[in-house]
Each structure stands twice: as structure tokens, then as C-alpha cells.
């Protein structure tokens, strides 16, 4: 297993077919563990980043957005599938097609951001 950041560079313990089998089974990783960061500092560094107030507030806000997005999608599917006094009685294929609406609305913006020359060309044809 090659890693540029390991100091000092350890010698390759085995070679050939045995090295490949050891790497496949994870034995090489176990042998190289003494040259890497221990589990404690590796996990604590992640928690130290998440524990900062601005990161926690961002994660909380994103969690709320995700929860409301899932709730709206599920409610929309149930509401559209119900019979007419309550809903619209759409079948499953129509409801599945409605899930593609946000994706279809995102395509023009991604074309504009990634390929602006295409939209400039198409708008010049419309004039």
C-alpha cells in the first residue's frame, strides 16, 4: 500500500503473489497501521470539526430542510393517489412522473452553468 505521507517510508515486507494476497485480505493494512494515525485522534478530529457552533447550526438547518422535503414528497404522493373527495386519484406512473419535475426543472440551469454556449446559440436562433 503506497502512501506519500508516511515518514519514514517503510520497506515492502513481501513481494509477488504473497504481497497481492496479503493486500487483498487486509494483512498489508494491518502491518502498515503503525505508520498511520491512531483511531482515537482520527475520530476526535471529525468530532472537533462538527462540534463548532457554525457547523452544528448548518447541520441542524440542513436536517430540517431534508425532513421537510421528505415530508412534502410523501404527503404529495399520498394526496395525489387518494380518491376524488380527498385527492386526485392519479395512478402510480403519474405520481412517479411528478417526481421527475424537479429534475427536469434543474436541467436548464445546469446547462446554463456548465454549457453556456449552448443556450447562447439556442437563444440566437430564436431571434
Image (tube, grey):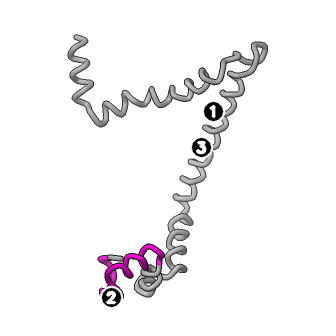
Q: Are marks 3 and 2 in contact (CB under 8 Å)?
A: no
Q: Relative to residue 119, is residue 93 drawn left or right? A: right
> Helix or strand or loop: what does disc 3 sit on?
helix
The reply to whether the magenta stretch includes residue 21 is: yes
The reply to whether the magenta stretch includes residue 15 is: yes
> Helix or strand or loop: what does disc 1 sit on?
helix
Magenta stretch, residue numbers: 3-26
Q: Nearer the viewer, mark 3 or mark 2?
A: 2
Residue at 31% from the left image edge and 31% from the top image edge: 112
Q: Is residue 56 above or below residue 98?
A: below
Query: According to the image, label 1 marks what residue?
Result: 73
> Of label 3 and label 2, which has the lower sequence position?
2
> Helix or strand or loop: what does disc 2 sit on?
loop
Give the CA separation, mark 3 to mark 1.
11 Å
| 55 and 70: which is toward the camera | 70
> Of label 1 and label 2, which has the lower sequence position?
2
> Of label 3 and label 1, which has the lower sequence position?
3
In the picture, the disc for residue 66 is 3
Q: Nearer the viewer, mark 3 or mark 1?
A: 1
Q: Is residue 27 above or below residue 57?
A: below
Query: According to the image, label 2 marks what residue?
Result: 10
Q: Residues within 10 Å of mark 2 (few under 14, many from 20)?
A: few
Spot occupied by residue 64 in the image (x, y as percentages of width and height): 62, 45
Quadrant (top left/top right/bottom left/bottom right) for the N terminus? bottom left
Amino acid at each position: 500500500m503506497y502512501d506519500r505521507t508516511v515518514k519514514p517510508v517503510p520497506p515492502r515486507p513481501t513481494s509477488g503473489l504473497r504481497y497481492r494476497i496479503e493486500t487483498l485480505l487486509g494483512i498489508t493494512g494491518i502491518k502498515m497501521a503503525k505508520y498511520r494515525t491512531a483511531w482515537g485522534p482520527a475520530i476526535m478530529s471529525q468530532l472537533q470539526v462538527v462540534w463548532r457552533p457554525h457547523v452544528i447550526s448548518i447541520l441542524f438547518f440542513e436536517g430540517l430542510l431534508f425532513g421537510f422535503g421528505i415530508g412534502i414528497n410523501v404527503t404529495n404522493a399520498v394526496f395525489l393517489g387518494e380518491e376524488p373527495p380527498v385527492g386526485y386519484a392519479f395512478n402510480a406512473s403519474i405520481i412517479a412522473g411528478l417526481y421527475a419535475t424537479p429534475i427536469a426543472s434543474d436541467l436548464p440551469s445546469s446547462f446554463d452553468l456548465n454549457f453556456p454556449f449552448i443556450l447562447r446559440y439556442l437563444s440566437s436562433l430564436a431571434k
